[in-house]
Amino acid sequence: MAIDQRLDHYKWRVVAMLWSISFFNYADRAALFTLFPLLEREMHLSPVQLGLLGSSFAWMYGLLAPFSGNLVDRISRKKAVLGGLYAWSTIAACTSLSRGFHQLLGFMTAEGVGESLYYPASMSMLSDYHGPETRSRAMGLHQTSVYVGTIAGGFFAGLIGEHYGWRWSFIVFGATGLLLGLFLLRYLREPIRSRTVGAESAAKPGLLEVLRYISKTPAAMLLLAGFCCANFVAMVLLSWMPKFLYDRFGLSVAVAGLSATLFVQLASMCGSPLGGWLADGMQKRRLGGRIAVQSAALFCGAPFVLLCSQTRSAGVLAGSLIAWGLFKGLYDANIFASIFDVIPAEARGTAAGVMNMIGWLCGGGLAPVTVGYLSERVGLSQAIGFTAGVYVLGGFVLLLASSSARRVTVRDVVAGNGNTMISVPNSGSV
């Protein structure tokens, strides 16, 4: 009994440790976008070039994600998590050496390499510490690190950049991430890997085998498409909202970076645990319940995306950002918990990697440069407003995914190498 209690307490401490790592994961990303006005002024960058800086990260991150995910299914998740932290923190610090657009582009691309390991490894680790009864809540709490990291990254990068120059922002975030990694080296432990019921003798699935399984599972394919839509809009918020506020409301770089993140991310911090709690409850009532929560969140968030782009009232803008953030959090809490309901336990790392690949290449990777291109032709306000329709499209896709997940049955998918992947959706791990 005492051992069980210690394990129960430790599994929530794991959430806290991974939370701190994810904080720096997103603080490093947000730092770049807040510094857009300073980079534009010093290096005379165009909107398309600024967009390419964000897109280059997303493209590399997405391209490597499935390979990183498959690697995570085969090696220690602890090594993958901490190795990724060391890599992206070092690259962030080195970004300060950039003297022009092409150097910046190279460092942003390289940072995508380091960060590609983290999410497949951390989500796989959490799924082994937390079964179906607490999985969405654990991942929802972990998701709040994204919002806090984005707020802190946006504000402090702008504050440091205004007073000491943009290079010091990257130095500070990179060095602090390295110190955190050294501290957690002692306390983070690798969990026992879960295996799907009846798959005790099956070998670890290869990347092609998992891709084949996903391609034959409609619910999984629709979840990928929904994530593309949601991530497209989220990346627009992250990359272009600080400059939108800087231009429209005449805010300083630091205040624009804070305002673009504070309202949305604090609201998402409330929405994410709520989304996890709602999804765990809905999933108990019917298959596809988690996905239904995500679909409703995108539908409800779309009007506020549009309102943010059109209003000239600071009060209306703040209220719209809060509502947008709340519904974004409801969706975000279940990104990986939903896909884990329809794929085998032994392929979770790879599935999370594939999810990141599709979401970031087709969603996040296109968003910054697409909005940059549109802003040169119709203005930044109209370009951001366009993304409300992307949210609506994602809501319809996830409605179909929820319906499809309800029809998922236990089935075997035989790979070309003769091994069998056995999926038992919504069942516990053994």
Image (cartoon, rainbow, N blue to C red):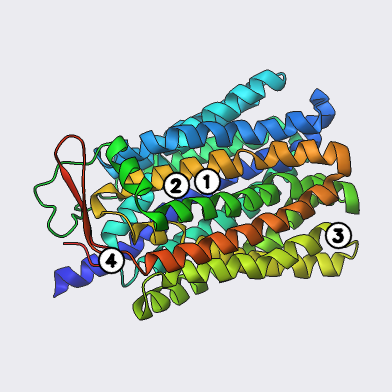
Separation of residues labelled 4 and 1 (CA atoms)? 25 Å
Neighbour tally class for label 2: few under 14, some 14-19, many 20 plus, Cα within 10 Å:
many
Q: Earlier in the sequence, mark 1 or mark 3?
A: 3
Residue type (three-letter) at the residue carrying disc 1 = Gly
Residue type (three-letter) at the residue carrying disc 4 = Gly
Task: Please tell me whether mark 4 sits on a helix, a strand or a loop.
Answer: loop
Relative depth, front residue between 2 and 338: 338
Q: Earlier in the sequence, mark 3 or mark 4?
A: 4
Residue identifier under label 4: 131
Task: Please tell me whether mark 1 sits on a helix, a strand or a loop.
Answer: helix
Relative depth, front residue between 40 and 162: 40
Residue identifier under label 1: 359
Q: Is residue 263 above or below residue 91?
A: below
Tell me where residue 166 appears, x and y as whole percent: 72, 33
Task: Please tell me whether mark 3 sits on a helix, a strand or a loop.
Answer: helix
Q: Is residue 88 visible?
A: no
Tell me where residue 217 appears, x and y as whole percent: 36, 53
